[in-house]
Image (tube, helix red, strand yellow):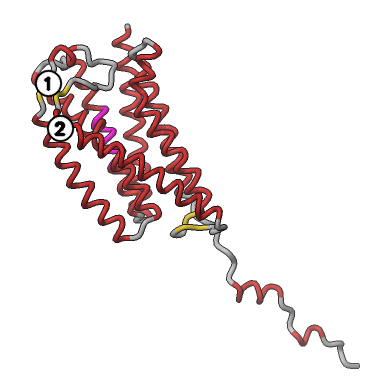
Amino acid sequence: METALLVSFAIVNVIVTAAFAGVVLMQYVQRHRPHQLYWSLALGMAFVATLAYVLMIPAQPTSGLGTILFRIYYILGAALTSAWLGLGSIALVGGRRVTLASLIVLSLVSVLAIISIATAGVDQQALSHVVGSSGRGVLQLGVGVVTIIILNTAGVVAVVGVLLYSLWKLLRRQPSIRGLQTSNIFWGNVLILLGELLNAAAGSFARFMGLESTFWLFMALGWLVFFCGVLLTGRRAPRAAPASAAATTTSVPASSQQPASS
């Protein structure tokens, strides 16, 4: 019964992440904003990671296919997603050079993380009980764990940095940043950060409550909160009416103000 609930909740996450990735990708196609591209890529990673986790269960985690699916889940879900979500936040307010530099560094660290996870040893005993957990402790990463720590830390730091930057702009009464409303960027990144923290703590919540199935419930909640933040940041700042138009609508022709001659 517990396994059936777990599979059901995990499938819900597959649907949720696929839908969110599709919506953000369509936004990018329509508006061509770089942060929408990076967010859609990160959500796509989350979708593939969750799908790999779901397929791992019927394949048996300790089988050859199950182990490969677990590595895919761990690479995309545990290592890369958070950092690439953070890159989206950087692109939201950063210039082209800052975003490009961040992309290059992130890509290099991501490659190192992929290599370390793909070649790491596997604790078969831990892998046999992985269903319902985040998978922490299954892979014998050694020093490779440093790359995962760097990626996850960088993702959170990027979101917090953008949050503080937008707060500073709010205090300086700057209404917009790169065409987007400053208050929306601030509160949107508050929700994005909360969503990331919920996802990161999902495994701990599941262990605390003593129910494996709650792991994917908290993951779904985290993605929902994150997506609300993404939608909020996308709201554009209201445009002020042009001064010339305002003058035209408020002025009255001089001839109409003169009294009619008898």
In the rendered structure, does residue 45 fall within the stretch colored magenta? yes
Q: Which residue type carries mark 1? A: Val
Q: Is residue 223 left or right of residue 167?
A: left
Residue under the image location 19 percent in, 43 percent down: 109
Quickly name the residue at label 2. Answer: 143
Please, is residue 51 above or below residue 97 in the view?
A: above
Q: Which mark is residue 247?
A: none
Per the image, label 1 sits on a secondary structure element best described as strand
Q: Which residues are magenta?
A: 42-50
- The number of numbered badges drawn on the structure is 2
Residue under the image location 20 percent in, 37 percent down: 147
Q: Is residue 77 left or right of residue 250?
A: left
Please, is residue 256 above or below residue 126 in the view?
A: below
Residue under the image location 37 percent in, 47 percent down: 89
Q: Which residue type carries mark 2? A: Val
Quickly name the residue at label 1. Answer: 122
Residue under the image location 20 percent in, 47 percent down: 107
Circle nearer the N terminus (1, 2): 1
Q: Position of residue 36 (x, y in %)?
A: 35, 49
In the current view of this chain or complex, which residue is farthest to the bottom?
Answer: 262
